[in-house]
Amino acid sequence: MLRIKKVSIQGFGPYINETISFNNKSGVTIIWGDNGFGKTTFINALKFCFFGELPKKNTLDQSILDTLNIIQKEQGDYRISVSIDFTIDNDHYSLVRFAQPINILKVPEKYSDFEIDFSLQKNGKLLAKRDGEKHLERVMPINTSRFFIFDGELLEQYNDLSDDSASTFMIKDSIEQILGLPILTNSKREIDSIKNVVNKELIELNKQSNSNNKSYKKIKDLNEKIANLKKDSIPIEEDYDKFLNELTKAQNDYNNDPVLRDKLELHSKFSDKEKETNKFIELKQKEIKQLINDSWRGLTYKILSLHQMEADSFIKEFENEKSEYDNYLRNIDHYQVSLNKKICETCEKYLNLDDIKNLQTKIDNMKQDLPKISEEKKSKYLKLVSQQEDLSYFLKNYRPEGTKLESYSRDIREYKLDLVKYKNKKEEIQKEIDNFTEKFDRSFKLGEELKQAKEKFKIVSEAKIKIETQIKELNDKIKDLESAIKKDISDEQLAEHKQKDELLSKFSELLEKGIARFREELKDRVQNDAQKLFLKFANQKDFVGLRINNNYALDIVHQSGALVPVKSSGYSHIVSLCLIGALHKNAPVQGPVFIDSPSGRLDLTHKDNLINILTDLSDQVVLLLYHGELDEDMVRSRLKQSLINEFVLIHKDGNAFETIIKER
């Protein structure tokens, strides 16, 4: 198994010089960090080190320049370095990839101003560049990286495996590569190549001994037709490669486009919470109607309950004020960064003198309007918080037996408060989304480019398949003629070639059947293992299993035996996670799973259930979570010994341009 032991990052995004070491034990590691603290950058650093892949931007120039740490750039340091120490079974590897200016006396302005290179050591010995490339391609091929290092959004790609599109072809190819099928398919290709050489020699020898045979003329004519078809296919093959590259780029640009993604995710998150809260309120109201009023045990419980309500109200009010205060400070810092850089952080527009003056005035006004929180309020807040445990104890012990009315009523009040909060958050986010019109247009443009690329690739693929089919039909005719010729062989030398040819033919046929059988067995194993995860994960009791198709797409099976025609976005997310877990279980070389924000569109129940399957995904699972994405106490109590380490991303001295990784 490939296991990552240590990651060191220098000058990459907000990481100036950070190192994180992972435990040797099998289990789950969690890296906690809110938005803007470097979770996605950490994933991008891993991709850069393994594959030389930079975060996707409009241009390569922007990709590398935006990746440089801002603090180091101001100090004249334009270097990036990411190193990963990892093991495969008993072998130890150390991989370093770096980017540095070619001319250290000149400020780099574009991608070509940088030298980007890597080094790989195996068991302490530095490998030659070509050997290093081969090792990396073998242990972590770039097209299988989607199953090892990814964010929750990437899971949506596995929902479109039911068609025969170009993107489906690429994902299916990646799936079969992680499952080890290329080992067999490449072997068959080699056997067929050797067989073709022997076959040509055989036909040539027989031709010399029987030059008047009419079959040779037919073979010659058919070969001429094949040669003409291959000549016609050259521009088609070129277009195929060109459009495949265009499609891959368009797909990657579209998938990695950061514009609006965070805002749309948050909007969707609060919409889901709003719906869920409404369901809870409706449920509690029904339960209240079914309750029979009961007598209170005493006045003590009422007094304590009222006191708790007042305390809760005050604590919430204080925390809202504190949140507003913190938001003010964050906005001031945001504007100050724009002022320092003379570039708007929101729209990336260069600021003129009037803009700078207006922005400075805005910052000064905001500082004057900064909300004040009195020491008296702080003291009262701390006092009430410290009383909560004792208050909860007395309320629990003085609660009248047999009554839940007050508890349900309080729940409804709290749910309604949450509902107001979620609606307000949605409105705030919607306003921000509305202000992103220009960038939204860019996202729409990327979608259109992807659509056009798919259409071009589809047309050239059909043309390619048509010519390949014609060539195959002609080759089949040639094989029939050659078979007839080879039956007449009597010469000892010809007989020897014929024996080789027949042996290679049988071996090739055996491999072809073996590949087909192995592929079916693999699909069955993937389906069964994914189904086991699904049944631990899914909360819908009438969903009883999964069924796999030829492209490795998984459909949900209803208890009636029918396939669920449309999966919700949440269940699509669940099925994709189950697929990844099953692929890792059946891969010949297993590896780690690094996931940024894995909960995606999951509701609260399925977020809880996600914890049940984490240790089944891989022996090394690393989650990058924002605070509140999963309940921290619940994660610790559920995972227990399987939670082997926790880290937190924090801004050093409150500086958004420098993130440090601290172990909890």
Image (cartoon, rainbow, N blue to C red):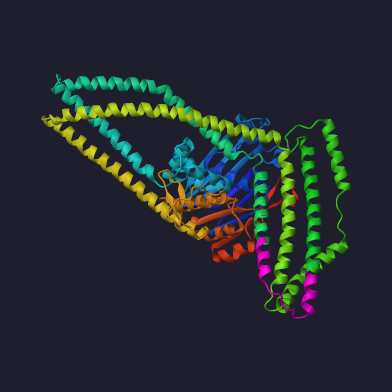
Where does residue 142 sit, x and y in percent of width and height?
49, 41
Q: Is residue 289 above or below residue 478?
A: below
Q: Is residue 459 above or below residue 288?
A: above
Where does residue 165 sit, x and y in percent of width and height?
47, 36
Q: Is residue 88 visible?
A: no
Taking the spot 50% from the left edge, 51% from the top edge, the residue there is 575
Residue furthest bottom in the image: 297
Q: Is residue 289 magenta?
A: yes
Quadrant position of the C terminus in the picture: bottom right
Taking the spot 73% from the left edge, 67% from the top edge, the residue there is 410
Where does residue 362 sit, x and y in percent of width and height?
85, 41
Q: Nearer the viewer, residue 40 or 175?
A: 175
Q: Is residue 450 above or below residue 605?
A: above
- In the image, 372: left or right of 635? right
Q: Is residue 149 visible?
A: yes
Q: Nearer the viewer, residue 282 or 413?
A: 282
Q: Is residue 648 above or below residue 297?
A: above
- In the image, 292: left or right of 545? right
Taking the spot 57% from the left edge, 47% from the top edge, the residue there is 151
Quarter residue 351 falls in = top right
Where does residue 162 sit, x and y in percent of width and height?
46, 42
Tell me where the magenta segment starts and ends, as one range: 282-308
Give the prevailing secondary structure in the magenta stretch: helix
Query: Number of callouts in the render?
Result: 0
Quarter residue 176 falls in = top left
Q: Nearer the viewer, residue 372 or 282?
A: 282
Taking the spot 70% from the left edge, 47% from the top edge, the residue there is 658
- In the image, 30: left or right of 120? right
Q: Is residue 657 magenta?
A: no
